[in-house]
Amino acid sequence: MTLAPVAGTYPKARRIKFRFDQHDSNDKYFVDGDMVFSHFVAGLSGGFPPGEESFIRSVRRVADRITDPLLKKRIAGFVGQEATHGQEHRQLNRKLVEMGYPIEWIDTEQAHARMLAIEERFSALVHLAATAAAEHYTAVLAERVLSSDEIQSIPAEPEFWNLLNWHALEELEHKSVAFDAFRAAGGTEGVRIGVMAGLYAFTLPFTFGSLAYALVRDPVARRQPVRVAREAYDLFRGPIFRGLMVELAKYMRPGFHPDDIDTTALLKHWQTELFGDDGVLVDHLK
């Protein structure tokens, strides 16, 4: 059963600032000294700012078709949260580039121009369907990150973890907004499922390809192929990817809605953990 948003509630952007300058740039492999896992996280961060800007453009393309007042507020909250995510990830990405991660090419003017050209080739509803599908990816990953003690116990740079936990929390807060905007704007089940099927088919090839590109450009990785193979095996057999494709495929079930996956208790726990009276990130709020 779909769990509709509680009347009068909607995601709200938090004004927040992270302190990435405190990390020693010489300490490159910030996820438990694991180069493959670190490159994977760096690649995710590198792609977030341009991706989230595309998500924002997709909901704005159908703004004139949305009439429900609560959905309009939810969309405004979604836009605010995604804009803040892009802003803070850009700060992190500058630090990651300084540390030697080859992610700068993802967020250049040329890359932005290519993204806009791709968007213009598709209708507003297909663009928004892609956003709704991508939001399912981020919601699935966010739920894994926040619900897994195994993941939370991985030693890593604390401020990088703070950013990822905050981002994951807000992804769950707005996980159904793009989906509901797509339906309200006239999107069909055929388009929704078809777009997801296309993205789903490219998930593993794109993940493997982009990670391999990053590792090939890392001189340490080139000198230690056995270590790379071992760490790659651990990453793809570990808690991030274990069963991931099955969870992603749920989106292609006819009649699926993101709120069919109830994350209410998880949200409440992490809202308190991060932003309650003694929350970990209260002192990061502006």
Image (tube, grey):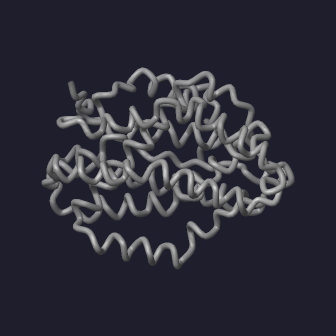
Q: Quadrant of the N terminus?
A: top left
**Residue located 78% across and 58% down the image:** 99
Q: Is residue 153 left or right of residue 187?
A: right
Is residue 75 at all visible to an observer of this figure?
Answer: no
Between 29 and 176, which is closer to the camera in this rendering?
29
Q: Position of residue 244 (x, y in %)?
A: 46, 34
Q: Is residue 33 left or right of residue 216?
A: right
**Residue located 44% across and 75% down the image:** 114
Q: Is residue 247 above or below residue 79?
A: above
**Residue located 37% across and 76% down the image:** 117
Snapshot quadrant of residue 166: top right
Between 196 and 51, which is closer to the camera in this rendering?
196
Give the total number of marks visible in the rendering: 0
Q: Position of residue 266 (x, y in %)?
A: 46, 24
**Residue located 21% across and 60% down the image:** 125
Q: Is residue 197 left or right of residue 284?
A: left
Q: Position of residue 247 (x, y in %)?
A: 39, 33
Is residue 8 at all visible to an observer of this figure?
Answer: yes
Q: Position of residue 42 (x, y in %)?
A: 65, 52
Snapshot quadrant of residue 161: top right
